[in-house]
Amino acid sequence: MISPTNQLDQRYTRSLWEYRDGHLWWREPKQGRRIGKPLGCVCKQWGYRVTYHHKKNYRVHILIWNYHNGDVPQGLNIDHINRDRADNRIENLRLATDAIQATNASHVEPLSGHMGIRYRKARKVWRVRLGKHRAECKEMIDAYRTRKSWEQELWGFTTY
């Protein structure tokens, strides 16, 4: 039922709930279950959908990952690709290290609308940064392409 890492077993998860449209739904009605409504509620403080089951709190995105893929490997987390913590569609979830999650959570520069790209007014260039990589580009599109190529090279994927 519950694995040593405090995760629910995939078979058990599938026996309790069914997945539809980014939500889990109870399979069988019982007292206290909200039939016709998605499992859990959105936590106002953190923005995650959470539920309480057998005296333990669970984040629903982790249950959804488990439903589709089994236990989350040790040292990895579930990341929301589009940064919306309440969007638990399986296609929006991925395994990620803490470092990858931190890059996805980093703030977006207000002028460029992209992480790691900022306009340097004094020099009239777009400055691109990623880890130790640095570049300056005259055009915003070139800065964006540079950033995305570095992400692909370093991580094997690009952020949102």
Image (tube, rainbow, N blue to C red):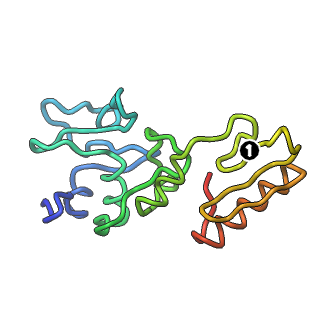
Instruction: Report how many numbered discs are placed on residues in the image.
Output: 1
Q: Which residue is found at the position 37% from the left and 59% from the top?
A: 77
Give 85 or 152, whichever is nearer the viewer. Answer: 152
Rendered location of residue 105, percent (x, y): 51, 47
Rendered location of residue 70, percent (x, y): 30, 66
Give 68 or 62, whichever is nearer the viewer. Answer: 62
Q: Which residue is found at the position 44% from the left and 41% from the top?
A: 85
Say left or right for 73 vs 91.
Answer: left
Q: Residues within 10 Å of mark 1 (few under 14, many from 20)?
A: many
Q: Which residue is found at the position 12% from the left and 60% from the top?
A: 1
Q: Which quadrant of the structure image shows residue 152?
A: bottom right
Give 112 or 121, whichever is nearer the viewer. Answer: 121
| Residue located farthest toward the top when viewing the structure as drawn | 44
Q: Is residue 91 above or below residue 118?
A: below
Q: Amino acid at mark 1?
A: Arg
Say left or right for 143 vs 33.
Answer: right
Label 1: element kind: strand
| Residue located farthest toward the left when viewing the structure as drawn | 55
Rendered location of residue 20, percent (x, y): 42, 47
Q: Is residue 64 above or below residue 41?
A: below
Q: Which residue is mark 1?
A: 118
Rendered location of residue 118, percent (x, y): 73, 44
Q: Which residue is found at the position 65% from the left and 47% from the top?
A: 115
